[in-house]
Amino acid sequence: MSMGNQTVSVQSDATVVKVMCALAMDLAINRGLKPSFESASGFCLNIDWRPTAALMASIAEGQRADLVIAIAESMDRLVAEGIVQPPTRATLADSALGVGVRQGSPQPDVSSVEAFKRAMVDARAVAYSKAGASGLYFADLIKRLGIADAVNAKAVIIPMGFTAEKVVNGEADLAVQQISELMTVPGVDVIGPFPAEIQVVSRFDAAVFAGAVNVQGAKAFLRMLTSSAAAKAYAEGGLTSRLAQP
C-alpha cells in the first residue's frame, strides 16, 4: 500500500524492516536492490521516503525505524546524539545536483555559470523543492547569483517530493534536484549537472538505529547496501558509489 512518498507495509511481524530513507536513493534501491533483497532474505522493506530534512524533523519528534539513510552531515548529528549505532555507520554514495526537462523538450545550455543563469531566467518556470537539501541550496544559490527575483516570480515550488513531475505535467520547463531524483521520474531528460563552480555533492550514509526492533533485518539490508550489487545499482541510479572497490 502506498501513501504519498511513503511505502507502507501491511505486515507487522519480525520479517518487516522499517527504513527511513532520503529521496535521492529511491531509484537505486527500488529498482536495483529492494526486489532482490526481499526475495533472497525473506525480509520485507517498509520504506519511508522523504528528504533528509523532513526525516530529521520526525526523528527529533521521536519517530524511529530500524535503519536510516541520510545525508552525512545529518548522520553526524544522529551519531553524536546516540540515535544510531556508530559501528554500523556505512558510507554509500554521492549525489550531485542537476537540471531536468521533459523528454524531447529543448535542452538549454547549463554547462557554465553564465549559461546556467540564462537558462534559469529564460525558463517559463523552474521547479524546485523547499524541503529538500537541493531546493534549500538552490534558493540560496539564485540569491547569490542575483537572479532570485526573476526565477521566483515564476517558480513552481513544491513542499517535498520529485520536482521532475512538474516538467512532465507541463507546469515547469526546468526541474532542479539531485540527478538521481530527476532520473526517478519517467519521461525526464537530465540535461546536465550544475557547473562545477556552483555544484554541491551530498554524501549519503546508512546506520542502524539504537534500539532498532529488527536488528537482524536492518543489518542484513545494510550488507546489501554495501555489496557489489549496490555499487552497480548506485551507478545506474544516478549516484556515484563510495563503496570500497574489491
Image: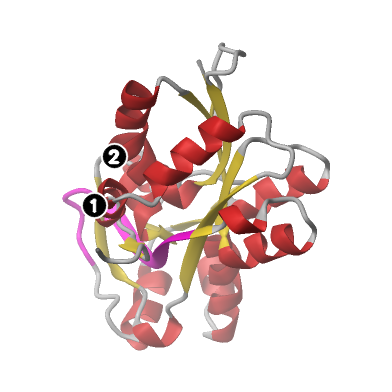
Does residue 220 appear left or right of residue 27 in this picture? right
Point out the residue furthest to the right here: 61
Task: Tell me: 34 left or right of 189.
Answer: right
Q: Is residue 245 left or right of residue 34?
A: left
Binning the other alpha carbons within 10 Å of mark 2 as few (below 14), some (14 to 19) or many (20 upward) gives: some
9 relative to 68, above or below: above
Q: Residue furthest left?
A: 104
Expressed as whole percent of the image width and height from the top left, the position of residue 3 reads 56, 23
Q: Residue at 38% of width from left, 42% of height from top?
A: 224
| Any part of residue 173 in sight | no
SS assignment at label 1? helix
Please, what secondary structure does the residue beneath circle 2 have?
A: helix
Is 94 one of the magenta-colored residues? yes
Who comes first in sequence, dot 1 or dot 2?
Answer: 2
Give amino acid for label 2. Gly
Q: Quadrant of the C terminus?
A: bottom left
Residue 195 visible in image? yes
- Image quadrant in which you'd find residue 94: bottom left
Q: CA distance from mark 1 to mark 2?
A: 8 Å
Above or below for 20 versus 22: above
Residue tagged by mark 2? 32
Residue 16 % position (x, y): 55, 22
Q: Which residues are magenta?
A: 91-107
Q: Which residue is mark 1?
A: 232
Up/down of 188 relative to 115, above or below: above
User: Where residue 229 sits: x, y (%)?
Assistant: 26, 46
Dot 1 crowding, Cα within 10 Å, few <14, some 14–19, many 20+? some
The reply to whether discs 1 and 2 touch (Cβ–Cβ < 8 Å) is yes
